[in-house]
Amino acid sequence: MHDTPKPPKLLKWPRALDQHYTQDQKILVTAGCSFTANTVRLDGPYSWPGVVLDRCGFEHCVDLSYPGVGNEFIANSVLNYVEGLDPALFKDVMIVVCWSGPDRKEELLTDANKLSKISPQIDNITYQWFRDSPSNQTRYPRYPGEVWRSWKNIIFLQNYLENKKIKFGFSLYCNTVDPPFLPRRDLTENFIDHLSKEKMTALKNCTWLHQFKDSFFEYCFFNNDCLSEDLFHPNTRGSLLWSDQVLLPGILAKNLITKSNA
């Protein structure tokens, strides 16, 4: 994680994978946590943003993801990127978000004495995952109250991108919406345990690109050789197969891309 480049990261290389789809946009914008961020190299399709970039023939990808971030950073990173664009360029952009654990708590800091050197920033504000606090010795703390904030961020970004008329779609790093749930190393809370029926309905009505049971972790868990050595994060093979078999078909089903005739 210490060597992971800070966002935004430009992903652009001579195409390494065959192109299977075409689209009307030039730029792919991606956001998420460690299930999205490429922590290996930035010169090829080692994570799902790179696979989507190559398979769809975008000119380049602006990757806003970073390991360890929560949904506050993810939503704000997309908001910050869009607000920096000329509205005339909205038609050239497609945004795909892979949401993180709903209970991750982030501190927004400006005090240099408290800042973590490995946390990302937006407008000189550092988003520090609360587990990095010196007073917190638990590796994966649980903050159920943050689930409501995650819900708010997802609903906000859904409405914001719709109002901007920007093409977009959402995915999940793991199923936190519909039971049954797989055991997960990070012990993240589930939305359904902390939200009203009305809020759950609003959440399920967002622009999801796959069934919740086909989230990234679930897919890799049930398919051989798709998890990394920690038996939690996807490896390069997992990123490729999940993109080809779940994510890209989901993007196609939302009419955001079309099949290539080549």
Image (tube, helix red, strand yellow):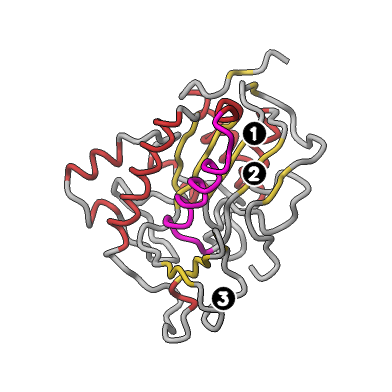
Q: Secondary structure at mark 1?
A: strand
Q: Say what amino acid the circle numbered 3 marks.
A: Ser
Query: Which sits in the foreground, 233 or 63?
Result: 63
Q: Which residue is mark 2?
A: 62
Query: Residue at left 40%, top 42%?
Result: 157
Residue 48 on image: x %, y %: 61, 43
Query: Which sits in the foreground, 229 or 122?
Result: 122
Between the residue at mark 2 and the residue at mark 1, the CA separation in whole angstroms equals 7 Å
**Rendered image quadrant of residue 184:** bottom left
Q: Residues within 10 Å of mark 1 (few under 14, many from 20)?
A: many
Q: Residues within 10 Å of mark 2 (few under 14, many from 20)?
A: many
Q: Are marks 2 and 1 in contact (CB under 8 Å)?
A: yes
Between the residue at mark 2 and the residue at mark 3, the CA separation in whole angstroms equals 24 Å
Q: Quick one: label 2 or label 1, which is nearer the N terminus?
A: 1
Q: Residues within 10 Å of mark 3 (few under 14, many from 20)?
A: some
Between the residue at mark 1 and the residue at mark 3, the CA separation in whole angstroms equals 31 Å
| Start-end of magenta stretch | 68-87
Q: Is residue 119 above or below residue 204?
A: below
